[in-house]
Amino acid sequence: MSVKVIVGAQWGDEGKGKIVDLLSVNADIVARFQGGANAGHTIVIDNKKYVLHLIPSGILNPITKCVIGNGVVIDPVALMEEIEMLKSHNIDVSGRLFISHKAHLIMPYHKMMDTVRESHNTDKSIGTTGRGIGPAYIDKAKRTGIRIVDLLDRKDFEEKLRYNISEYNEVLTKIYGHDELDVDAIVEKYIEFDKLIDPYVTDISTLLNIYIAEGKEILVEGAQGALLDLDHGTYPFVTSSNPTSGGACTGLGIPPTKVDEIIGIVKAYTTRVGNGPFPTQLDDEVGKQLATIGHEFGATTGRPRRCGWLDLFALKYSVMINGISNIVLTKLDVLDGLEEIKVCTGYTINGKTLNSFPVDMQKFNNIELVYKSFKGWKTDTTQFKSYSAFPSEVKDYIDFIEEFTGARVSMISVSPDRNDTIVR
C-alpha cells in the first residue's frame, strides 16, 4: 500500500499530466485534490494527444479509478465536455470516475465576474484564465458557495442561487454596467446537470479511506504549481487554492499520516504563464528558442508562456515546503541544442545575498541573480533509453540539481510521449 502525492514544483506547466498518466499504470486510484478547469494536463500516447482539465490523467489507463475531490471547483460544462471527449476516443468513465458531493460548483456568475474584474482592472491584472476559479473559491470562503450536494434539494438550491444571483446582479449592473443574469435559466440548466452527474457522485473521503485500509495504490495529483500556492506562492500572483502537498489532505479528506511519498515534477528550465514575478525570465533569443522548441503555450488557454533558466533557488524552497523526496525532471530534450546552460543558485538585493525565498518578490525590482553555467550536451537526448547512456554533461546537470535541492532526480522525461521516460 502507498499513497503518493504528485505536485508541480514550479509555476505550473511542468508536465504533470504525462507523469501521472505514466505512474497510474501501477495505481488503483488517481485522485485530484484542488483547482478547477484552469488546469491543463496534456498526455501523448501513440502520437495521439489528450488534453484534460478536470478529470485526473489516470483515466487513460482502463483499470484505474479516478477521483475528483472536495477541494476541486467544478465547471459542469467543462466536465461534461471532457467526459464526451473521452467517450469519443472509446474511453468509458462509467464505474471509474467518482466525484465528491462536497465539491463546489462554478456558476455562470463566477465566470462573468472573473472576466469583468480582469478587464476593468488591467493595471492590476493577475492574469487569470477567466474560468471563474477565483470567484468560486471566494464564495466557498464566504460560505455562500453551492456544492454538488445542494443540487439534491431543488427548493434549497433555488433559494441559495437566487440569493447569490441577486447579490451578483447588483455588482454586475451597478459597478460594471453588465446585463443581469437570468435566475430561472440557470436553475434549469443546473438541475439538468444534476441528472447527468449523479452516477459519479459519492462520499470521496470515505471511499478513499476504505481504499487506503484495503492497501490500494493511490496516486494523488494537484493542478498548477507550488509557487502559485495561495499561501506559499508569489502572492498576489497566485492561484486560488493550495497546490502544495499540504492541500492534498484537505482537498480529499485523507489524513497526512497516510501519505508515503511526495514527488515533485520539475521542468528542466522554468516557465510562467500569466503575470507575476519571474526572476530568470529570458527576453532574448535563448528564451524564444526554449518557447519554440518546448511548444510553450498553455493547454487550457493557448497563452504563450514566459521562459527562462532553471531557478534552483526557488526550487529548493519548493522542495522544502512540499517535503519532496523525489524529482521527475521533464522536457530535458528542449535544452539539447544549447551551447551553454545556466541555473540560478541565489538572489541578491542591494548587494545582500538572500538566505530564503522572498515572500514579497514582486516589490523588488533590483534582484540580481547568481548563476552557475554548464556546458551544453549538444546531443539528441530522445535517443537514450537509460540513464547510464546519457552524456557526462547531462549527468553533471542532473547531479547539481540533486546536490543543490537535496532531492533525488528519479525520472527524466525527454519527450511528450509516455514511453520516452527514463527511470533511474
Image: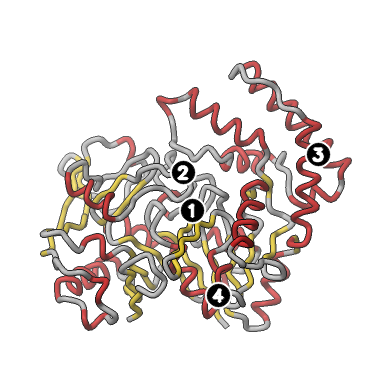
Q: CA distance from mark 4 to mark 2?
A: 31 Å
Q: Amino acid at mark 4?
A: Val
User: Are the residues at dot 1 and dot 2 in contact (C-beta closer than 8 Å)?
Assistant: yes
Q: Is residue 157 left or right of residue 287?
A: right
The image quarter in which residue 29 lies? bottom right
| CB within 8 Å, label 3 to label 2 | no
Q: Residues within 10 Å of mark 2 (few under 14, many from 20)?
A: some
Q: Quadrant of residue 405?
A: bottom left
Name the residue carrying label 2.
301
At 43% from the left and 25% from the top, the residue drawn is 122
Q: Which mark is residue 188?
A: 3
State the separation of the CA atoms marked 4 and 3: 40 Å
Asked whether 140 or 147 is in front, the reply is: 147
Say if 239 sits above or below 5 in the image. Answer: above
In three-dimensional space, the C-alpha distance between marks 4 and 1, rounded to whole angstroms, equals 23 Å
4 and 1 marks in contact (CB < 8 Å): no
Q: CA distance from mark 3 to mark 1?
A: 29 Å
